[in-house]
């Protein structure tokens, strides 16, 4: 697996761990925030695999949707997951008097974990396929 992709997956995994701890400790808004970053770094791993990088979160999300959702590499539900957690995170960070419930935080954590596993498996299988092709060439 590409070193930058692997690094981003590590960042995503760490955000998932923290999100779960915050969820368990009933810090729901902060848990959603960490779930968002888990999803962001997971999507960024795919961007890195493609040897690109973007400074804006919206560009990473747009690239993922164009190159991985529209091409049906990943199911469209992952696009919805990104949109939902992005909106909830923005509401929590930039809107007064937002109350994020436990169910919302649990849903976002579960979506982030599912997305992380799907991308990690994709990248690992892609690496295995490349290794098999390379070994056939020798």
Image (spheres, helix red, strand yellow):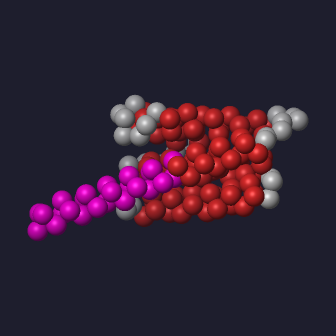
**Is 137 above or below relative to 106?**
below
Front-most of residues 52 and 113 = 113
Front-most of residues 79 and 114 = 114
Q: Is residue 134 magenta?
A: yes
Q: Is residue 95 magenta?
A: no
**Is 51 above or below relative to 91?**
below
Residue at the outermost front position? 103
Total residue callouts: 0
Find residue 79 and report its horizontal and vertical position in percent. Answer: 52, 35
Image point (68%, 52%), residue name? 34
Magenta stretch, overall SS? helix
Q: Is residue 59 visible?
A: no
Q: Which residues are magenta?
A: 115-138
Q: Is residue 65 visible?
A: yes
Image point (42%, 64%), residue name? 3
Image quadrant in which you'd find residue 102: top right
Residue at the outermost top position? 70
Image point (25%, 57%), residue name? 129
Image point (65%, 38%), residue name? 86
Image quadrant in which you'd find residue 69: top left
User: In which quadrant of the rendered image does the C terminus lie?
Assistant: bottom left
Horizontally, residue 30 falls left or right of residue 53, namely right
Horizontally, residue 108 falls left or right of residue 9, namely right
Find residue 19 and report its horizontal and vertical position in percent. Answer: 69, 56
Image quadrant in which you'd find residue 133: bottom left
Front-most of residues 103 and 39 = 103
**Is 7 above or below relative to 69?**
below
User: In which quadrant of the rendered image does the N terminus lie?
Assistant: bottom left
Find residue 67 and report its horizontal and vertical position in percent. Answer: 40, 37
Horizontally, residue 101 falls left or right of residue 9, namely right
Find residue 49 and report its horizontal and vertical position in percent. Answer: 40, 53
């Amino acid at each position: 697996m590409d070193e930058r992709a692997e690094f981003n997956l590590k960042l995503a995994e760490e955000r998932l761990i923290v999100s779960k701890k915050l969820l368990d400790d009933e810090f729901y808004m902060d848990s959603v925030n960490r779930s968002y970053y888990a999803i962001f770094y997971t999507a960024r791993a795919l961007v890195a695999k493609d040897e690109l990088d973007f400074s804006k979160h919206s560009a990473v999300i747009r690239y993922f949707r164009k190159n991985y959702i529209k091409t049906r590499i990943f199911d469209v539900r992952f696009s919805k997951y990104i949109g939902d957690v992005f909106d909830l995170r923005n509401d929590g960070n930039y809107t007064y008097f937002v109350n994020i419930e436990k169910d919302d935080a649990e849903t976002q954590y579960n979506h982030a974990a599912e997305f992380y596993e799907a991308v990690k498996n994709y990248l690992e299988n892609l690496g295995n396929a490349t290794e098999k092709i390379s070994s056939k060439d020798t």
